[in-house]
Image (cartoon, rainbow, N blue to C red):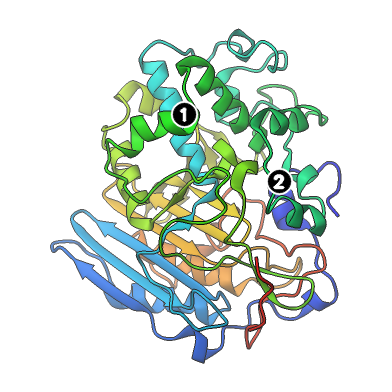
Amino acid sequence: MLRPHQSRRDFLRTVAGSAVAATALAAGASPALAGPAGTTRTGSGGTLPDEALRDTLRAVTDAGMPGVFAEVRDGRTTWRGASGVADVTTGRPMRPDFQHRIGSITKTFVSTVLLQLVGERRLVLDAPLHRYLPHLAPAGVTVRMLLDQTSGINDYDHVIFGSVEGIEKYQHTTIRPLELAAIGLGQEPTNAPGERHSYSNTNYVLAGLLLERITGRPAAAEITRRVLRPLGLHRTYFPGTDPRIDGPHSAGYLPWVDGTLRDFSVYNMSWAWMVGDIVSTTADLNTFFRGLFGGRLLRPAELAQMRRTVPADPAFPNGAQYGLGLINLPLPSGPVWGHDGVVLGHQAMSLHSPDGRRQVSVALNATHYWVPGQPDPIGDALGNFLLTALGGTATTPEPATLSRTPGSLLGHGPLSAVPGAATLHRPLPTGRVAG
């Protein structure tokens, strides 16, 4: 059960598993299920290390992840790869062109449109939120504080997902944005407005309501009109209350309390709304971030505001930084920008050089598998792949910067198991409870 003070991200990382979960989580996938990575390369003139990318991506499934796929770009050169399985029961292979739930990367899309409104002088970043949402805004909170997560407004996830029963309930339950906002605002604040970064999904529920208040249109429709269509992101969309993903996709696994891997790829995502609703592909994500950093979506002044950061953890002021819906990470090969995302069973990470030339987007099909106090070989392998993709090397000692599963870029540690859950182990469980 979630402790009352925990935010959604704390929940995803620190809820301890049962004695069953003490089984080595990331000892590796069965070789029969993992299979060799399938890769393709297009374009020329880039410096992508094909063999190293293939090997480090394969290492993620060797470490225990059922399946993973990615797209890496260097200028006009593109590498795509996949490893492992999309379905542990049938052995259906993972493919690099799958659609996938991208979770909190949705926040970057929301922030982008709000900054477009700033550029149109319809919104003021440092204005009190009360100016736009008088019946919802806590005193002292500004628009900027929503987007850089310094408002002090608490999260709602730990309320709706505070138990296994809650996870099952909301799989088939629609919850409205105003309900989500009321839950978050009803919790004790995490800090005074502007005092420090404290990640809360409620901030982006309010950001979505703000977007609708200013434009007079549904937030998903406005983001589609302003971002998805202009960039040609034809495989990116907001599913809303439709629980199924439209196109070819992987299962989305949680190690469940009965010792199986439970597929949650079918899920009513109303709980995530402007927080984490989007379905996309790694190719569309790279196109989005290249368009964003290349000036196709924002003017230089608004992009500079987006990159105005605060420490993700005040104890480490030189570590990860959070801007307006953007994460900045200092890596040995240079700073990168992007975001990560986690929903039940699907996780994604998208990181990019400041100019959008060097890019990596990666998707994985299991979440909530780490046991606190245990090693995290999946996260270590993922960190090595990301460093390789971004121009570093897999042997550098720096992967600790990236060596946790998506959702941990802000420095809070890897995803932890759902209450009472079994963990990924060798061989992977083949019995599935229908999601």
Categorize mark 2 by other alpha carbons within 10 Å: few (<14), some (14-19), many (20+): many
Residue 8 numbered mark, or none: 2
Q: Report the residue at 40% width, 57% height from top.
A: 361
Q: Residue furthest top?
A: 131
Residue 243 place in picture, x, y as percent: 57, 53
Q: Can the viewer see residue 176?
A: yes
> Along the line of sight, which residue is nearer the eye, 237 or 351?
237
Q: Assign the C terminus to one quadrant of the image.
A: bottom right
Q: Can the viewer see residue 396?
A: no
The amino acid pointed to by label 2 is: Arg
- Quick check: 360 left or right of 345? left
Task: Choose mark 1 or mark 2, whichever is in front.
Answer: 2
Residue 136 numbered mark, or none: none
Q: Are marks 1 and 2 in contact (CB under 8 Å)?
A: no
> Along the line of sight, which residue is nearer the eye, 432 or 300?
432
- Quick check: 302 left or right of 166? left
Residue 325 place in picture, x, y as percent: 50, 35
Could you say which quadrant of the image residue 267 lies in?
bottom right
Q: Residue furthest bottom?
A: 32
The residue carrying mark 1 is: 308
Location of residue 380 with respect to 141 vertically, above or below: below
Location of residue 152 with respect to 74 vertically, above or below: above
- Quick check: 356 left or right of 429? left
Location of residue 141 with respect to 43 vertically, above or below: above
Residue 250 place in picture, x, y as percent: 49, 68
The amino acid pointed to by label 1 is: Arg
3D distance between C-alphas at marks 1 and 2: 24 Å
Is disc 2 placed on a helix, strand or loop?
helix
Categorize mark 1 by other alpha carbons within 10 Å: few (<14), some (14-19), many (20+): some
Location of residue 317 with respect to 56 vertically, above or below: above
